[in-house]
Protein backbone atom coordinates (compact mmCIF):
# COMPACT_ATOMS: atom_id res chain seq x y z
CA UNK A 1 0.00 0.00 0.00
CA UNK A 2 1.10 3.52 -0.78
CA UNK A 3 -0.35 6.53 1.01
CA UNK A 4 -0.17 9.81 -0.87
CA UNK A 5 -0.70 13.24 0.70
CA UNK A 6 -0.82 16.40 -1.38
CA UNK A 7 -0.02 19.86 -0.06
CA UNK A 8 0.74 23.33 -1.34
CA UNK A 9 -2.62 24.35 -2.73
CA UNK A 10 -4.19 27.69 -2.00
CA UNK A 11 -5.50 30.94 -3.40
CA UNK A 12 -3.34 32.83 -5.88
CA UNK A 13 -3.89 35.65 -8.36
CA UNK A 14 -3.69 35.23 -12.11
CA UNK A 15 -0.05 35.06 -13.14
CA UNK A 16 1.07 33.77 -9.78
CA UNK A 17 2.84 30.56 -8.85
CA UNK A 18 2.35 27.62 -6.53
CA UNK A 19 4.31 24.47 -5.88
CA UNK A 20 2.39 21.36 -5.03
CA UNK A 21 3.99 18.49 -3.17
CA UNK A 22 2.94 14.86 -2.96
CA UNK A 23 4.49 12.96 -0.09
CA UNK A 24 4.35 9.19 -0.13
CA UNK A 25 4.55 6.71 2.70
CA UNK A 26 4.26 2.98 2.96
CA UNK A 27 6.58 2.12 0.10
CA UNK A 28 9.49 3.61 -1.79
CA UNK A 29 8.20 5.97 -4.42
CA UNK A 30 10.95 5.06 -6.82
CA UNK A 31 9.03 1.99 -7.90
CA UNK A 32 6.10 4.01 -9.22
CA UNK A 33 5.28 6.16 -12.19
CA UNK A 34 3.62 9.28 -10.84
CA UNK A 35 0.98 11.59 -12.17
CA UNK A 36 -0.80 14.79 -11.27
CA UNK A 37 -4.46 15.08 -12.17
CA UNK A 38 -6.97 17.84 -11.63
CA UNK A 39 -10.72 18.13 -11.42
CA UNK A 40 -12.53 21.41 -11.83
CA UNK A 41 -16.09 21.88 -10.54
CA UNK A 42 -18.54 20.07 -12.79
CA UNK A 43 -15.81 18.57 -14.95
CA UNK A 44 -14.06 15.23 -15.27
CA UNK A 45 -10.73 14.50 -13.66
CA UNK A 46 -7.95 14.91 -16.23
CA UNK A 47 -4.25 14.24 -16.27
CA UNK A 48 -2.04 17.30 -15.95
CA UNK A 49 1.44 15.85 -15.89
CA UNK A 50 3.37 12.64 -15.34
CA UNK A 51 6.88 11.54 -14.57
CA UNK A 52 8.70 8.25 -14.98
CA UNK A 53 10.16 6.26 -12.11
CA UNK A 54 13.65 7.69 -12.47
CA UNK A 55 12.46 11.15 -13.44
CA UNK A 56 14.02 11.06 -16.89
CA UNK A 57 10.74 11.23 -18.81
CA UNK A 58 7.90 13.68 -18.34
CA UNK A 59 4.52 14.33 -19.89
CA UNK A 60 2.36 17.44 -19.87
CA UNK A 61 -1.15 18.18 -21.00
CA UNK A 62 -1.21 20.78 -23.76
CA UNK A 63 -2.98 23.27 -21.53
CA UNK A 64 -0.08 23.43 -19.06
CA UNK A 65 2.97 22.98 -21.29
CA UNK A 66 5.53 25.68 -20.69
CA UNK A 67 3.89 26.74 -17.42
CA UNK A 68 4.02 23.64 -15.17
CA UNK A 69 7.03 21.51 -14.28
CA UNK A 70 6.88 18.10 -12.67
CA UNK A 71 9.79 16.70 -10.70
CA UNK A 72 10.49 14.07 -8.10
CA UNK A 73 12.92 13.36 -5.30
CA UNK A 74 12.87 9.63 -4.70
CA UNK A 75 15.15 10.04 -1.72
CA UNK A 76 12.50 12.19 -0.07
CA UNK A 77 9.64 10.07 -1.44
CA UNK A 78 8.08 13.21 -2.86
CA UNK A 79 6.79 14.43 -6.20
CA UNK A 80 6.36 18.10 -7.03
CA UNK A 81 4.37 20.19 -9.45
CA UNK A 82 5.67 23.70 -9.97
CA UNK A 83 2.90 25.82 -11.44
CA UNK A 84 3.75 29.21 -12.93
CA UNK A 85 1.72 31.78 -14.85
CA UNK A 86 -1.45 30.44 -13.32
CA UNK A 87 -4.77 31.16 -14.99
CA UNK A 88 -8.33 31.10 -13.64
CA UNK A 89 -8.95 27.95 -15.70
CA UNK A 90 -6.29 26.18 -13.62
CA UNK A 91 -8.66 26.32 -10.65
CA UNK A 92 -9.31 22.75 -9.55
CA UNK A 93 -8.61 20.11 -6.97
CA UNK A 94 -5.23 18.62 -7.79
CA UNK A 95 -4.55 14.96 -7.09
CA UNK A 96 -1.38 12.95 -7.24
CA UNK A 97 -1.50 9.30 -8.15
CA UNK A 98 0.87 6.39 -8.48
CA UNK A 99 1.01 3.35 -10.71
CA UNK A 100 3.35 0.41 -11.08
CA UNK A 101 2.38 -0.07 -14.72
CA UNK A 102 5.07 0.45 -17.31
CA UNK A 103 4.82 2.04 -20.71
CA UNK A 104 4.66 5.43 -22.41
CA UNK A 105 3.55 8.04 -19.93
CA UNK A 106 0.70 9.28 -22.11
CA UNK A 107 -0.67 5.71 -22.19
CA UNK A 108 0.02 4.57 -18.62
CA UNK A 109 -0.93 7.67 -16.65
CA UNK A 110 -4.65 7.71 -17.19
CA UNK A 111 -7.58 7.87 -14.83
CA UNK A 112 -8.32 4.14 -14.76
CA UNK A 113 -4.75 2.88 -14.64
CA UNK A 114 -3.52 4.48 -11.44
CA UNK A 115 -3.15 2.24 -8.41
CA UNK A 116 -3.11 4.79 -5.60
CA UNK A 117 -4.56 8.27 -5.15
CA UNK A 118 -4.18 11.12 -2.72
CA UNK A 119 -7.15 13.07 -1.42
CA UNK A 120 -6.30 16.22 -3.31
CA UNK A 121 -5.40 19.82 -2.67
CA UNK A 122 -7.45 22.80 -3.85
CA UNK A 123 -5.92 25.41 -6.11
CA UNK A 124 -7.92 28.56 -6.71
CA UNK A 125 -6.73 31.19 -9.18
CA UNK A 126 -8.51 34.53 -8.95
CA UNK A 127 -8.88 36.83 -11.93
Image (cartoon, rainbow, N blue to C red):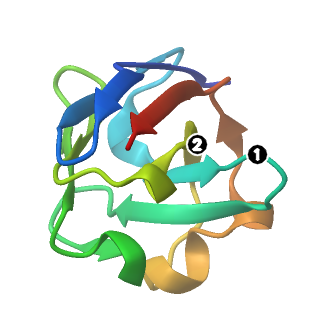
Q: Quadrant of the N terminus?
A: top right
* Left or right: 46 in relation to 71: right
Measuring from the top left, give residue 27's x and y in whole percent. Answer: 49, 23
Residue corresponding to mark 2: 92
Q: Is residue 56 visible?
A: yes
Q: Which residue is at the front of the view, 41 or 98?
A: 41
Q: Secondary structure at mark 1?
A: loop
Task: Report the side of 78 relative to 95 (left or right).
Answer: left
Disc 1 from disc 2: Cα separation: 7 Å
Residue drawn 76% across the image and 45% down it? 41
Marks 2 and 1: in contact by CB < 8 Å? yes
- Where is mark 1, residue-wise? 41
Q: Residue at x 45, y 85 (%)?
A: 104
Q: Position of residue 116 (x, y in %)?
A: 68, 38
Nearest the viewer among 53 and 89 is: 89
Q: Earlier in the sequence, mark 1 or mark 2?
A: 1
Displayed quadrant of residue 92: top right
Note whether 122 is above or below 116 in the view shown. above
Q: Is residue 116 above or below residue 101?
A: above
What is the quadrant of the C terminus in the image? top left
Amino acid sequence: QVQLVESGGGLVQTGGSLRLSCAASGRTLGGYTMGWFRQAPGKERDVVSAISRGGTSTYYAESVKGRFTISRDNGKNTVYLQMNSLLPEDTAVYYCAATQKLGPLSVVVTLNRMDYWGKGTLVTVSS
